[in-house]
Image (cartoon, rainbow, N blue to C red):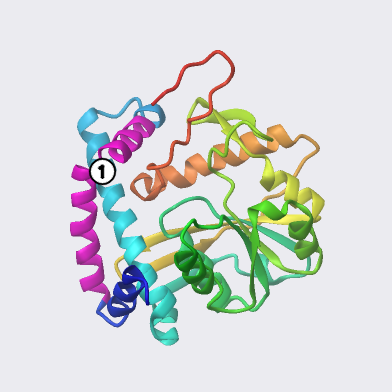
Amino acid sequence: MQHPGILLMRALAPLPLAWIRALGSVMGRLLFVLARQRRHIALTNLRLAYPEWSEDRRRAVARRSFVYFSQAFLDRAWLWHGDPEIVRQRLHVTGATQDLTREGAVVMFAPHFYGMDAGGSAVMQQIDRPACTIYTTQPDAVLDAWMQRGRQRFGDATLLSRTQGVKPIVRALREGKMLYLLPDMDFGPSESVFVPFFGVSAATVPSLSRFAKLGNARVVPVVTRLIGTGYEVRVYPAWEAYPSADATADTALMNERLQGYINEMPEQYYWVHKRFKTRPPGETSLY
């Protein structure tokens, strides 16, 4: 028997984008009211990141954030099931794409904006180079298989389980695959370093610096913005003199540059995650 959620996404896939986005808007506004815990997390994150904002402004940004979250979730319907040519028309890749295709290993820094799945699909569909990314297995086997198929729909894409460790990632980089990496989350104290994020100490995995160094790779930011016609996937020029010999300094620089990307569209960042969950020894929970 097919999973009802997957059947719904297949049914949504051929609908006009405006209809899917309208449904996502309604869904997001409902979630903002009903998902109290996630609303609290988002508002707490925004208070920490933007203490100078008024409470009304933070609530307005959080509400829009829930709308973008829902729209991006429903967009997986056409990303993973829609006509490939329609998908291509809705994914606009811009910027320094030559830094993805020229010789040498590449780690793409893909922050947790809500368009991250669309960004991955766009790169695989429109950039002629094999790539890989790291994924976390979902508890529901049917949904896990669906998500894997969706993320491997275009191009030569390889999914590497987080449980496999570092060796397959480094091997893939040395084989010429690009790595689509999303390192800007709190995965707990193990192997994390505490560096500032919006002026607040945040446990951050130094994987961007680490993988770039182990794979002798350049770091190319890929930032995806949800827009009315689909998504804009902006490829920024490769970072110079990165990584350095200091992984902690590299990770602090990553967070600093990420703040700049977030400031351009704060309502599209993944504020529903407990980004400041892990605290330095002696500090109490911020949530």
Residue 34 within the segment the image draws in magenta = yes
Q: Position of residue 238 (x, y in %)?
A: 66, 56
- Main SS of the magenta part reads helix
The tally of labels here is 1
| Depth check, front residue: 228 or 94 | 228
| Depth check, front residue: 79 or 137 | 137
> Dot 1: within a 10 Å radius of its alpha carbon, few (fewer than 14), some, or many (20 or more) residues?
few
| Depth check, front residue: 167 or 21 | 167
Q: Is residue 96 left or right of residue 242?
A: left
Kindly indicate the quadrant of the structure image that contains residue 243.
top right
Magenta span of residues: 17-46
Q: Is residue 134 left or right of residue 197?
A: right
Q: Residue at x 75, y 52 (%)?
A: 166
Judging from the image, what secondary structure is the residue with disc 1 in? loop
Label 1 belongs to which residue?
Answer: 35
Q: Residue at x 30, y 83 (%)?
A: 14
Q: Is residue 56 above or below residue 30?
A: above
Hey, what amino acid is under mark 1?
A: Ala
Instruction: Give the farthest residue toward the front.
Output: 1
